[in-house]
Image: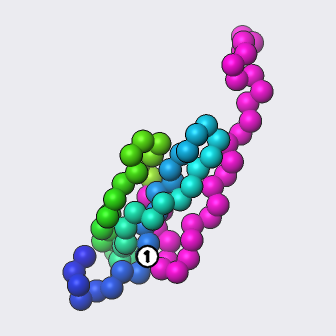
Amino acid sequence: MSDSKAPTHTAFALKREGRRFHRWLEIGKARMEGPGKPADVMLDRTPIGGWNGYVYLAPIGTKPPDPDPEPHHPAQGGREEDV
């Protein structure tokens, strides 16, 4: 991003922490010119481990939505029935 154009969005990554918990990490800034135009994204950092590569762009001053909790699978660790 050039210095003459200020960023319009903040880039976030959803980092997995443990089996059931996630949190958003701020990883950079972006400038979006408008619909149908490319976005310029500058990442300052990326999470190590637990990251699937997805980047969420939120307008500056806003936060991304709370991550959905992982579904509970009662059969985990047990024997699954044949289907």
Image coords of residue 25 (percent x, y): 48, 60
Q: Which of 44 and 67 is in front in this view?
A: 44
Residue 36 lies in the magenta stretch: no
- Amino acid, disc 1: His
Image coords of residue 46 (percent x, y): 36, 54
Residue 70 lies in the magenta stretch: yes
Q: Residue at x 50, y 50 (%)?
A: 15
Quarter occupied by the C terminus? top right
- State the residue position of label 1: 9
Horizontally, residue 54 falls left or right of residue 46, namely right
Q: Give the range drawn in magenta.
A: 55-83
Q: Which residue is drawn at 25% across and 76% down?
A: 1
Q: Main secondary structure of the magenta part?
A: loop
Residue 52 appearing in the image? no
Q: Which of 63 and 54 is in front in this view?
A: 63
Q: Which residue is drawn at 47% across and 42% down?
A: 50
Image coords of residue 26 (percent x, y): 45, 65
Q: In this view, does 11 lie above or below 74?
A: below
Q: In this view, does 37 lie above or below 65?
A: below
Residue 71 appearing in the image? yes
